[in-house]
Image (spheres, helix red, strand yellow):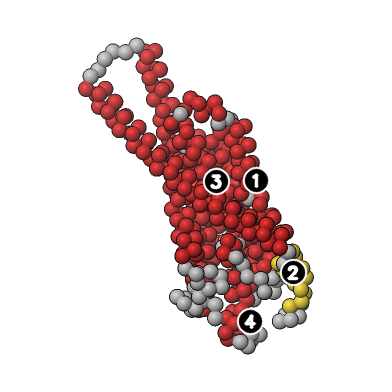
Amino acid sequence: MYVHSPEEHNTTRYLALEQMTENLFQLWEGHNKDPSAVTIASGILNDEQLYIILLFIIYTSQVINNCAIITNSLSIAVFVKLGFSEPSNISLTALAICDFTLAVLLTWSNLCFLLTYHKVRLPFHGANVTFLTGGVQWAFLSSTVAWITAFISFERCLCILVPLKVRRLITPRFTFVAMLVIILLTFCPSFFIYIRYKFVWVFNPYHNITILNTIPLNDEFAILFEKISLVICGVIQPVLAFLIVLICTVLLVGQLRKTSSWRMLVTSAKSQRVQPKENHAAGSSSEEAKISQKEERLVRMVVAIATIFIVSYIPTCIDLICYVVFDEFNQFGVYRGLFIVSGYIISLGQTISGSVNFLIYYKMASKFRSVFRRLVRLDCYEQE
């Protein structure tokens, strides 16, 4: 029997979850005569507690998924209306597309779980097929979201530290190419998992039907290739992106504080003395202040996006630490029930992060807010 290696931390969670679900359903329907086969939550959670928690998380997750699908669809539509002359619009559009896809993939996984819960006979094995059509892609795409957020944060840091050089380097074309490279290096390797697994039709003796299932291949090259892909794209890349976002966010917050302190000093100095100025000089000063405030609003928006990403990604880092420190914290160990629940909590946190970005854009970006209001005709209703 093939046993998953520790590096397959994210992708095998779906497999373990559906196997647990199938065992429970078989016990309830009287198919499984061996009670030990469903003792899957020994340790902290028993089977009943685990199942109640999972149902609550999945229903909550699906409500948030629906919100994420709607809000990210609106964000994509607004950014398309705004155009892509600004590099930030390109990166934020890519982020919205990835968040939208994450919500769709998680909806597919939730739907298969709930259909199994309601005893709907699916023409495929829910866990294994969902594993290859949703779970693997979700795990890799979450790494893509992390790196796009890291790129946005890093680009803002450079704009603050070396503004003249960065504006010549980070053009719309450069940003578009950077988004393609990030997707190719983080998400596209998920399709290499199909070298390790293949779809087959198998007979289900419990329901007397033939269903679609997946089986792992015992080819040494395929196993090695899968492990390398999972280590690089599933562990190293997300952690490195998280650290970049964290460092850049700290630098941006520090720069915002310096800017606020400088403006307070300038305002205080101007209030103490009044000097006549030429109209041209006043207009120039006003224009410079306007540009400075525009940059500051964009930095604040990026800081808000990065902060929410950091908060939502902390459970992932804790989960990885527990996975490394505690030998029994895995899909086959004593704490496998807690392991499965933590996986759904992680997915729930990342879905929340993707769904609230729209509110940040609407609150902090005046152009985004204006185009959105015209798009849904709110301004027309207010005028009437």
Mark 2 surroundings: few (<14), some (14-19) or many (≥20) residues within 10 A: some
User: Could you tell me how many numbered marks the image carries?
Assistant: 4
- Amino acid beneath label 4: Gln
Which label number is shown at residue 26?
Answer: 4
Label 2 vs label 3: CA separation?
A: 35 Å
Which comes sooner in the sequence, label 2 or label 3? Answer: 3
- Amino acid beneath label 3: Trp
| Res 377 visible | no
Q: Which residue is mark 3?
A: 147
Q: Please tell me whether mark 2 or mark 3 is closer to you in this view.
A: 3
Label 2 vs label 1: CA separation?
A: 29 Å
Local secondary structure at mark 1: helix
Give the residue displayed 25% in from the left and 27% down from the top: 268
Q: Quadrant of the N terminus?
A: bottom right
Label 4 vs label 1: CA separation?
A: 41 Å
- Tell me residue 365's x, y (percent): 47, 37
Lateral position of residue 9 relative to residue 382, left or right: right
Which comes sooner in the sequence, label 4 or label 1? Answer: 4
Give the residue displayed 31% in from the left and 29% down from the top: 262
Mark 1 surroundings: few (<14), some (14-19) or many (≥20) residues within 10 A: few
Label 2 vs label 4: CA separation?
A: 19 Å
Q: Which residue is mark 1?
A: 184
Give the residue displayed 58% in from the left and 41% down from the top: 93
- Tell me residue 274's x, y (percent): 25, 17
- Amino acid beneath label 2: Leu
Q: Please tell me whether mark 4 or mark 3 is closer to you in this view.
A: 3
Local secondary structure at mark 4: helix
State the residue in front, 342 or 6: 6
Q: Which residue is mark 2?
A: 212
